[in-house]
Amino acid sequence: MRTEWERGRMSLPRLLVRGRGWIGLAWMVAAGLLLPQAGRVAKVLDVSARIPGSESAAVERLLAGPLASSYARYGVLVAGGIPSPDTPAGAATLHRIVMTLWDAPQVSGVFSYLDHPDSLFVAPRGRGTFVFVGFAPDSGAPDRLLLPLRQVTEALADTLRAEHPAVTLRWTGETALNVDLRRASSVDVASAERRALPLTLLVLLVAFGALTAALLPVLAGALAIAVTLGAAAIVASAWPLSILLQSVVVMLGLGLGIDYALLMVSRFREALAAGSPPEPAAEEAVRHAGHTILLSAAAVALGFTVLLTVPLNEMRAIAVGGLLVVIVSALMATTLLPGVLAVLGHRVDWGRLGRRTRPPSGSEMWRRWGRWVTARPWAALVLGVLPLVVLAAQAPRLRTGLPQGDWLPSSMESVRALADLRAMGRRGVVQSLRVVVRLPASRPEPRAAEWNALARYAGTLRVDPRLERVRSVFTVAEAQGLDWADLVTLPEGLRPAFMRGLVSADGGMALLELVPRDGITPTQAVALARELRVSAAAQIGVPGVRVLVGGLPAFNSDYQDAVAGRFWEIVLWIVAGTLLALFLGFRSVLVPLKAVALNLLTVAATFGAVVLVFQEGHGARLFHVTEPLGAVFSSLPVIVFSIVFGLSMDYEVFLMARVREIRFAGACNRDAIVEALGTTAHVITSAAGIMLVVFAAFTLGDFLITKVLGFALAVAVLLDATVVRMLIGPALLQLADRWNWWPGSIARRADRRAA
């Protein structure tokens, strides 16, 4: 007789199927509320990464506060195809550009060769110049700020072409790059969807042999994505989230959303083929597939939950997007889809492609494969482990940091402006470092000795071979023919305008802006930022002085530090949580340990593949990467581990749940493995094929991080669904025999029944 617990478990599938009308109504209401929000998700997501509490963020606050710089937030307008600004014609053209910018309400400051005839603004190679443009504090979000400015400069460029036919006015800098990345990311995601959906449908048609059965998972995945994006838009309105959320939601929604629905439809068709009426068949599908889906979803969600601990809005966006899409996909497959299947009944096989659909009872070919593996478990184990170990051996060589070369999408205006700067030999202006020096607050007026020490330090920076320019109150005063010692002691109301943003109102804070030389790589700029943070205060030599370093290189340094220190902590939490979830799901010690060990091996092999292809460039041209990257983004190992570890659990859960079910019914260990392979192999193969198609679609996009992420996920799924689940996993199950289920009673009960 069934226990009360088992009867309670039986009642939930019946409740879900018989209450399908109310459940469908609830989903309609949720969709009606959330789908309109999905259309605005790209507008509320943040392109720029944020690191709360970091040193670079502190510098930004000081520039917007005590230092009151007109250039706290700024862009670079690159003017190409015009005469050099040190010629009369070039100066006249530059004057027109500057005066036009000053008329724009979004502009708080314009700094060019006209303000300071520095050779920095004169291109040593070719024509053109550039202008620093400060953005007004109240100019709004980057999109609303840059769009009208681009309209102004495009109209101006049309006018200037009458005199200078080759003129170009292009915006770059952090703000412009962020705006362009936001737009290009949305286009990239849409393109990946268009590439993936037809191929996904084709895989499902091959798997099911029927149009209706193939369409159901696709529709479920598409609806899961739309609902998730709507929910994410609401969350992002109150909690800043990165644009990476969009890519993750679409990628996993197409993968997991379709996979979960695929499993439910497969179990339903299997029950129909066994003679069950539609409603009992739907209940049977919920009873078996529902448990598997929820256990798999819990394993995937765990990785995203742990990602929430990383203090970066990019990681938080991936975590929130991943959690939402996993929860929505799992709930849709276990609540909405069973009711739809019960209504469809045998019409689920409508639109057959041939005389017969694929037999739901499984594949004899895979049963033969299972018998071969279980008869030669040691040979199968060696055959499967060897290629994984070879790949995993490359993983320790993985380097994190900023990739080499030009990896930003070349179609973006801001990237073309960077190319213009490089042609001028002035690309370093977008890598500027901002050094804020706080003098000791022992007196209201800083002592002359303190300012003299700071002036000497600024002088040492000016001769640093890594720097092109150092802008400070000392250099500006020198260019104006003034004595800086007199300027810093003047009351705020009497100070010249050029001192704004360089010295605070109380005279206790100064800003040094450092422009790296053109040949300095981003990695070298990060190293310079780290060096300044360590040595600047000591070199100034004033007791109590405090130095804060900001700017893009300093931000990159903070980003790397925020991610790198948490990798092993995240690994530990995910592994521990997965062990617990699988122990509760299977009531076994060995099954969770085996699953975690194989997942770790799969992740290591995935990292090894990334090293070979992207870091070292073997075959990278297949993914439109023209040169070895030398390193991968600091966030990538954390993201890949968190997602791959959960995804790899999918097929482990699919296979083990069926082995447990058959073993519980009284079969011996070997027969359970063979039958489980026969009945789940086509589901696992189809699910893996769908994920491969989806992830491969993202490798063809323009964004390097999504390209590498898509490749890593595709490799992990391929290895896990083939070598691990079809070779290593069954071999280990056969070798462990009844110890697979220790300390539970399943094996003992099965052995007694078999006897």
Image: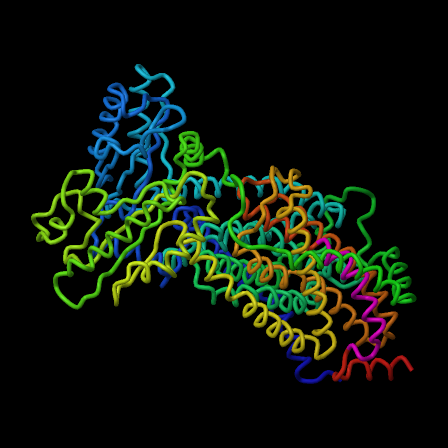
Q: Which residues are magenta?
A: 718-740
Residue toward you, 667 or 629: 629
Relative vertical location of residue 378 with respect to residue 622 in this rendering, above or below: below
Q: Quadrant of the N terminus?
A: bottom right
Q: Main secondary structure of the magenta part?
A: helix
Q: Measuring 76% from the left and 64% from the top, which residue is drawn there?
A: 276
Q: Is 725 a magenta residue?
A: yes
Q: Determine the image quadrant of residue 136.
A: top left
Q: Position of residue 509 (x, y in %)?
A: 21, 57
* Residue at the image point whose x is 35% and y is 42% from the top: 143
Q: Nearer the viewer, residue 564 or 233?
A: 564
Quadrant of the rendered structure where residue 601 is? bottom right
Residue 338 quadrant: bottom right
Name the side, left or right, on which 621 lies relative to 49.
right
User: Can residue 249 be seen by looking at this rendering?
Assistant: no
Q: How is the image coloured?
A: rainbow
Q: Within the magenta stretch, is there residue 123? A: no
Judge whether residue 503 can be spotted in this image: yes
User: 247 left or right of 286?
Assistant: left
- Report x, y in % for residue 441: 18, 66
Left or right of 479 in this view: 229:
right
Residue furthest to the top in view is: 162
- Where residue 47 appears, as percent x and y from the top left, is 42, 48
Placement of 88 over or under 573, stated as above or below: above
Closer-to-camera residue (168/209): 168
Decide: is 47 above or below 635: above
The x and y percentages for residue 101 are 24, 32
Residue found 51% across the figure and 49% down from its top = 402
| Left or right of residue 175, residue 218 in this image | right
Q: How many marks?
A: 0
The residue lying toward the viewer, choosing from 490 and 184, is 490
- Image quarter (top left, top right, bottom left or bottom right) of the C terminus: bottom right
